[in-house]
Every structure is written in structure tokens, then in C-alpha cells.
Amino acid sequence: SQKIEQNSEALNIQEGKTATLTCNYTNYSPAYLQWYRQDPGRGPVFLLLIRENEKEKRKERLKVTFDTTLKQSLFHITASQPADSATYLCALDPGDGGATNKLIFGTGTLLAVQP
Amino acid sequence: GAGVSQSPSNKVTEKGKDVELRCDPISGHTALYWYRQRLGQGLEFLIYFQGNSAPDKSGLPSDRFSAERTGESVSTLTIQRTQQEDSAVYLCASSLVFLSAKNIQYFGAGTRLSVL
């Protein structure tokens, strides 16, 4: 069956450390993968997109990797701050060449950065 | 408006009543999506509209759920004869659909539905 898995347990880290969140998928062949941030009571906000032919993408303190062999994406936040505390969702296209224009979302990982 | 607008932000209803949720997408965005998010869960796809094409209704959980969209503007999600299991946050998103946009979705704040 097709599924996207993110660590359901909250990730607690100390301020200043690097947070690493994992997104694993099975039975999809996505052309790209996206990461979103969701704060309580808000809708998700787009952060980064990485294409299947890209190994790594950076934006300020954020870094995303995409390994299509392992079927895994890693999301890193360096020099983490308490303001980075939120739920982070990965999302991918189903790999049907855009026929559906849908995104499939993971369940998200809650990140808590302790001061 | 600058972003996706949803109303109401909160809705409390009694079991068996009908509810209507509204979404106003970003101007110019041809695609519109509805999702359901239960407490502590991920986003569950409900329905997708793209221009004048037939909507993708594959995520609607039952025939009590329906949605409409007028052209490329406002959409309404209707839940008939609400059940307690319908309690959730209903999120709407819009996006541009062309190759370089890669379906980046812009979300509203959601409608929190509570069925008593």
C-alpha cells in the first residue's frame, strides 16, 4: 500500500542544536517533495520544495535532502530557536505525471525547541 | 484578499444538522482543495477543483459530504446530517497549476467544526 510516514513522536531539542525530521514513503514515485510548517490553529505554510533530481535544497537555516533510492527526505533546521517549535509536514505528488495535481501529506512531526 | 479566507472560523452544531463551510481562494489560483484534519492527525484529502474540469471527489468520506465551486472563485463544502465523527478542522487550500508552480498550496486558517 502507499503511505508516507513521519515520526509521530514529538522531537524535543535544545535551542541552538540542529533538528532533523524524517519523511519516508513507500510505493510512490514523486517528481518532487514539499515541506510545510503548521502552527496551532493555523493552516500549513509552505517552506521548501525539492525535485527528484535534486539531492539537497537550502533556505536560510533550513536544509532538505531527497533520496529517491531510500525513498526518504530529511528536513534540517540548524541553530534551532524556540520560535521554530511547530508541526512540520512533508507532502509529495503521487508520481502520476501531474494527472491528479494532488499532494499527499504525511501526519507531521511536532518539534519543540527548549530555550 | 491577499490569502485564502475561510469562514466561519468556528462552528458548533448539533448532530443531524447541516453545515456549510466557505472558502475564498487567492485571486488567480485555478486549483482549490478541501482537507479534513482530525485532532493530532495529518491532512485528509477530500475534494479538488481545477478550473472548469470535473472535480476530483475521490476523498469525500460519504454522500453526506458535497462541495461546489463557482468558476475559479468561492467554494462551499456542505456536510449534511452531521455526525460527531465529522468534528475536525476543515482546511481549504488554493494553488496555481502550471509546471513551474509545482502545486505549492496556500492554506486558509481552517474552520473548526464541533458536532455535539
Image (spheres, rainbow, N blue to C red):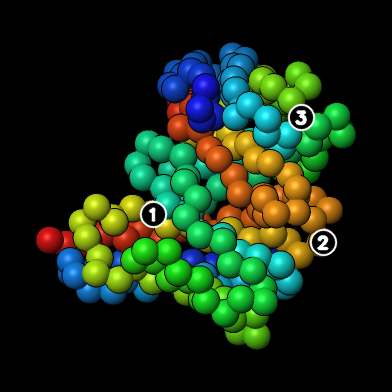
Q: Earlier in the sequence, mark 1 or mark 2?
A: 1
Q: Are marks 1 and 3 in contact (CB under 8 Å)?
A: no
Q: For residue A41, which quarter of the picture?
A: top left
Q: Is residue B110 left or right of residue A11?
A: right
Element type at marker 1? Answer: strand
Q: Is residue A19 above or below residue B112?
A: below
Q: Is residue A94 left or right of residue A66?
A: right
- The picture places residue B81, in percent across and down from the top left corner, at 64, 19
Instruction: Give how far apart the Cα atoms at labels 3 and 2 are.
Output: 29 Å
Which mark's residue is nearer the viewer, 1 or 2? 2
Considering every residue shown, the one lying at the far left of the view is A115
What numbered label is drawn on residue A87? 1
Q: Which residue is mark 2?
A: A97
Answer whether residue B72 is visible to the viewer in this image.
Answer: yes
Q: For residue B27, which quarter of the picture?
A: top right
Label 2 resides on the chain identified as A
The answer to whether marks 1 and 3 sit on the same chain is no
- The picture places residue B37, in percent across and down from the top left corner, at 52, 42
What numbered label is drawn on residue B63? 3
- The picture places residue B77, in percent across and down from the top left corner, at 66, 24
The residue sitting at 39% across, 71% down in the picture is A76
Indicate the amino acid at tag 1.
Thr
Instruction: Give how far apart the Cα atoms at labels 1 and 3 are.
Output: 32 Å
Indicate the amino acid at tag 3.
Asp
The residue sitting at 52% across, 76% down in the picture is A56
- The picture places residue A79, in percent across and down from the top left corner, at 24, 69
